[in-house]
């Protein structure tokens, strides 16, 4: 276990702040966690403190169901630690010394896990998570890898964190204080094509992702042309130099949207004017070559050289072009400002990686990106173009481990991506209770059982219960309980059926239905979601029935109907974890 000085050093490394209230705290370091919450590290003047040197506030006892299961953390809740140095904590029995609870921690990872629980209690929705290799708390300052995959069971916040990671990769200097600000900035980046989104599936292939042949009919004749896929297109755009940006104003025209096909302007009267991006680029090419003179009468702009441009789309908006074309030329002459682009690949493990990436898998490596010493180029099979992956393209994938195990992922993909595990975090639910049901304990208990009966990759995510927490936070307890019932009926139970292939005996074990007789004297079936009914073979098949099977089933399982009273009975949910708590208390 870590000594007091070792804990003190690790807390400093994690970015925790020492409180400056006293010049010399002779028996404890004081750390401020935010929102008027503190913790202390015991100390002596001449030596380290070895025995339980970390002290948390009395309020932490409300989180004992979360703290007790943390790997590498040991605490004795029966013995309060009292000292006048714990000046921020309440006094024991109201008139004795301030008190808290002393802990021992094994290593820095145990400290990080403990802080994760404490911060989740202090903040409703932390904008960061402490992980085992985290060197600083503020994740808005963490360096972003070029290729990364968020993986974990369903409902663990992979999509939630993908949005944040995409914004940090595309605009590293952007800071936000609320989720709304982050989402608004994300939407703006999507609108300007700086962030793209694609979902892999079993039928997805190289032709859709990189390039392929597409057919079109003209005058009754079929012709084929090369069509860029989403990956090739974003690579080309990441290398290109942007000359027009959303928010630009040219005369009375404001740029409100940019896509591959259109640049959208809003006129002074509020009307929207979409113009082909290809048309604007062609007009600019002629202007840059000196063929278009915007100071001459507008009816002469497109004369004197060969072109197929419909003149109205240029001369009809001469006020726009007179300001836009010179601005584009000014930007074109400036040194290129490299903008970051992001490609988000949802469900990356559901696609055939070799079929989708083909020969380009090698080019994803950071060292093989264009501009690096070991950069590589390949020739594309359809267009024959030389192709490389630019250094300013970030690829972020998500992977549901319940859908396919990480162990059977394509090895080539594993070597080229950083894998970030996203496991359930019951601490994010805090001490939220619905009709007396402790959501964090409920989730933790079911996941403990699933891990034993199946594996940790098929746990239940905390995101399933976040809508319930949202109703509680807004003071709508009735809606919260209704939402909890809906989560169990429409999400938790169907997911368990899929996990255990309708092995109802194991589903009953996860829900604690087999133990509910221990905790209740009332009708057991009133607390069970999955009920066990004996099979009467004589009644079903007659008195002369003889089974051909040596071990024929003796009972059937039935899931309670959607209108059954068990769904609206808070005792049924509390009984899921009640027996576990009883056994743990008996063992302690």
Image (cartoon, grey):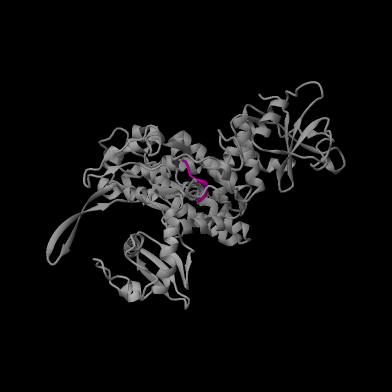
Q: Residue furthest left?
A: 221
Q: Quadrant of the C terminus?
A: top right
Q: Is residue 461 magenta?
A: yes
| Total numbered circles | 0
Camera-nearest residue between 198 and 464: 198
- x and y, in percent, of residue 222 in the image: 13, 60
Relative height, residue 216 to residue 147 (above, below)? below
Q: Is residue 561 visible?
A: no
Residue at screen point 42% across, 60% down: 328
Vertical order, 60 against 250 (above or below): above
Query: Looking at the image, which is closer to me, 77 or 527?
Result: 77
Q: Quadrant of the N terminus?
A: top right
Q: Position of residue 373 (x, y in %)?
A: 40, 32
Tell me the residue at 47%/78% (across/down): 269
Q: Which residue lies most toward the bottom here? A: 269
Residue 518 position in % (x across, y down)? 56, 41
Specify whether residue 577 is painted magenta. no
Q: Is residue 585 left or right of residue 157?
A: right
* Front in this rendered view, residue 377 or 170: 377
Q: Is residue 510 left or right of residue 360?
A: right
491 sits left or right of 97 in the view? left
Is residue 320 in view? yes
Q: Main secondary structure of the magenta part?
A: loop
Q: Horizontal and vertical percent for residue 123? A: 64, 49
**Start and end of the magenta stretch?**
459-463
**Quadrant of res 40:** top right
Q: Residue furthest top?
A: 47
Q: Residue at x 45, y 62 (%)?
A: 327
Which is nearer the eye, 196 or 518? 196
């Amino acid at each position: 276990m870590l000594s007091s000085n070792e804990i003190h050093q690790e807390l400093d490394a994690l970015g925790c702040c020492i409180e400056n209230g006293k010049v010399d705290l002779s028996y404890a370091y004081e750390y401020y966690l935010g929102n008027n919450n503190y913790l202390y590290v015991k100390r002596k003047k001449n030596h380290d403190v070895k025995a339980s040197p970390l002290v948390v506030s009395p309020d932490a006892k409300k989180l004992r169901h979360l703290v007790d299961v943390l790997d590498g953390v040991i605490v004795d809740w029966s013995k309060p630690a009292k000292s006048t140095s714990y000046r921020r904590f309440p006094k024991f029995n109201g008139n004795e010394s301030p008190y808290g609870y002393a802990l021992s921690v094994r290593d820095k990872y145990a400290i990080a896990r403990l802080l994760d629980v404490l911060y989740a209690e202090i903040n409703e929705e932390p904008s960061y998570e402490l992980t085992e290799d985290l060197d600083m708390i503020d994740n808005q300052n963490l360096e972003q890898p070029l290729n990364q995959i968020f993986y974990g069971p369903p409902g663990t916040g992979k999509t939630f964190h993908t949005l944040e990671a995409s914004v940090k990769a595309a605009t590293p200097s952007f800071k936000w204080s609320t989720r709304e600000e982050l989402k608004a900035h994300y939407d703006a980046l999507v609108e300007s094509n700086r962030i793209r989104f694609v979902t892999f599936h079993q039928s997805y292939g190289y032709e859709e992702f990189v390039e392929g042949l597409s057919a079109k009919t003209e005058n009754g004749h079929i012709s084929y042309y090369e069509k860029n896929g989403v990956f090739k297109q974003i690579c080309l755009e990441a290398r290109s130099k942007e000359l027009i940006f959303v928010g630009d104003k040219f005369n009375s025209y404001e740029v409100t949207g940019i896509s591959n096909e259109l640049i959208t302007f809003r006129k002074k009267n509020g009307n929207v004017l979409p113009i082909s991006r290809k048309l604007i680029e062609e007009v600019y090419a002629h202007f840059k070559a000196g063929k278009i003179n915007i100071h001459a009468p507008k009816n002469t702009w497109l004369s004197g050289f060969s072109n197929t441009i419909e003149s109205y789309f240029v001369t009809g908006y001469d006020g726009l072009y007179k300001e836009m074309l010179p601005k584009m030329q000014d930007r074109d002459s400036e040194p290129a400002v490299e903008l970051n682009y992001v490609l988000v690949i949802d469900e990356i493990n559901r696609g055939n990686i070799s079929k989708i990436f083909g020969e380009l898998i090698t080019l994803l490596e950071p060292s093989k990106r264009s501009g690096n010493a070991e950069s590589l180029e390949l020739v594309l099979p359809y267009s024959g173009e030389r192709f490389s992956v630019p250094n300013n393209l970030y690829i972020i994938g998500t992977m549901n481990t319940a859908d396919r195990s990480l162990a059977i992922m394509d090895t080539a993909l594993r070597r080229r991506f950083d894998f970030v595990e996203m496991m359930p975090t019951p601490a994010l639910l805090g001490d939220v209770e619905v009709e007396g049901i402790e959501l964090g304990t409920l989730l933790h208990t079911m996941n403990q059982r699933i891990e034993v009966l199946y594996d940790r990759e098929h746990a239940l995510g905390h995101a399933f219960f976040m809508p319930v927490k949202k109703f509680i936070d807004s003071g709508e307890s009735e809606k919260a309980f209704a939402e909890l019932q809906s989560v169990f009926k429409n999400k938790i139970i169907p997911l368990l059926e899929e996990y255990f292939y309708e092995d109802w005996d194991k589903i009953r074990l996860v829900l604690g239905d087999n133990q509910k007789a221990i905790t209740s004297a009332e009708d057991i079936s009133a607390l069970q979601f999955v009920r066990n009914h004996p099979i009467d073979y004589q009644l079903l098949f007659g008195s002369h029935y003889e089974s051909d099977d040596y071990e024929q089933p003796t009972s059937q399982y039935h899931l309670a109907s959607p209108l059954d009273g068990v769904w609206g009975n808070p005792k049924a949910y509390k009984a899921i974890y009640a027996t576990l708590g009883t056994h743990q208390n008996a063992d302690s």
